[in-house]
């Protein structure tokens, strides 16, 4: 491809953004950008350092942090200040707090700077909760993924079980509903569908069906005959 392309995927927690973005990136040979992992990393450090309720300290940390992502073998590896925290950022404790910390305007501003810089390199698939509206408003293709709350709960519960985290279905559902409310209601960069985004409910689809659908849309929107 001659043009440097940006594909942006938004949607609530558990809607399949990460899986879809990873699959597209691998299929097309694009860079995968997991913006949510960045906010999780900040949240993990805030919890570990005992400053999760100290907004000023969190902002100061976000401004000084050296945050790097590496997408290798289908996994996003996360490094903060040269320490890998890939496994730690997916805990239930981080899940319960990440939306609160993500809504801090100064934290978002710092991470969006990093995300935009990565986007300048082009040929990227970015996913998160504001990538189509704030981070990459001029993306070549914007997708808003959705799924029912029960489907999203089952997906997230399965992720916890695979990592041997002890948590119940009801606890996961309550956490997702809380995150939906916070993400959609925050004043800065709320979760919402961009006007020119394709809305796609994948509740009844497998990841493979998800990918097939989105690849068709990529062809339609970008009119690129060399995307297979």
Image (cartoon, rainbow, N blue to C red):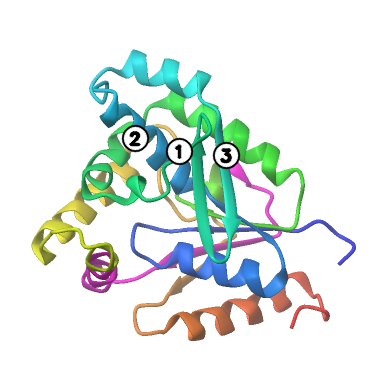
Q: Mark 1 points at which residue?
A: 189
Quadrant including the C terminus: bottom right
User: Which residue is label 3 attached to?
Assistant: 68
**In magenta segment, residue 44:** no
Q: Nearer the viewer, mark 1 or mark 3?
A: 3
Distance from the alpha carbon under mark 3 to that under mark 2: 15 Å
Residue 5 in the image: state x and y as whole percent. Answer: 76, 58
Label 1 crowd (10 A; few <14 / some 14-19 / many >=20): many
- Label 3: how many residues lie within 10 Å, few (<14), some (14-19) or many (20+)? some
Of label 3 and label 2, which has the lower sequence position? 2
* Secondary structure type for disc 2: helix
Q: Percent from the top left, x then y, of residue 133?
A: 55, 46
Q: Which residue is drawn at 34% across and 78% down?
A: 203
Give the number of the disc on residue 91: none
Instruction: Say whether marks 1 and 3 touch (CB < 8 Å).
Output: no
SS at mark 1 in the image:
loop
Tag 3 secondary structure: strand
Q: Quadrant of residue 30?
A: bottom right
As drawn, the residue found furthest toward the right would be 2
- Give the distance between the C-alpha atoms of the residues marked 1 and 3, in whole angstroms: 22 Å
The answer to which of marks 1 and 3 sits earlier in the sequence is 3
In the rendered structure, the answer to whether residue 176 lies left or right of residue 109 reads: left
Left or right: residue 15 compared with residue 48? right
Quadrant that contains the N terminus: bottom right
| Residue 130 in picture, x, y percent from top left | 49, 46
Residue 75's place in the image compared with 81, above or below, is below
- Res 43 label: 2
Left or right: residue 38 versus residue 159 is right
Please tell me whether mark 2 or mark 1 is closer to you in this view. 2
**Left-right relation of 60 to 30:** left
What span is colored magenta in the figure? 135-158
Residue at (45, 27) in percent of width and height: 107
């Amino acid at each position: 491809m001659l043009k440097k392309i940006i594909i942006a995927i938004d949607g609530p927690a558990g809607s399949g953004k990460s899986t879809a973005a990873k699959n597209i990136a691998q299929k097309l040979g694009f860079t995968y950008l997991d913006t949510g992992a960045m906010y999780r990393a900040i949240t993990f450090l805030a919890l570990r350092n005992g400053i999760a309720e100290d907004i000023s300290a969190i902002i100061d940390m976000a401004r000084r942090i050296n945050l790097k992502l590496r997408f290798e073998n289908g996994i996003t590896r996360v490094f903060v200040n040269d320490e890998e925290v890939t496994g730690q950022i997916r805990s239930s404790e981080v899940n319960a707090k990440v939306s609160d910390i993500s809504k801090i305007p100064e934290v978002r501003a710092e991470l969006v700077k990093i995300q935009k810089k990565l986007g300048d390199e082009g040929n990227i698939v970015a996913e998160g909760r504001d990538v189509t509206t704030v981070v990459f408003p001029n993306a070549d293709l914007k997708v808003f993924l959705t799924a029912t709350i029960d489907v999203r709960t089952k997906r997230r519960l399965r992720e916890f079980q695979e990592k041997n985290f002890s948590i119940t279905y009801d606890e996961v559902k309550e956490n997702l509903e809380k995150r939906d409310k916070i993400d959609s209601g925050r004043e800065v960069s709320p979760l919402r569908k961009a006007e020119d985004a394709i809305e796609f409910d994948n509740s009844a689809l497998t990841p493979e069906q998800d990918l097939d659908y989105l690849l068709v849309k990529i062809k339609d929107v970008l009119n690129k005959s060399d995307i297979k």
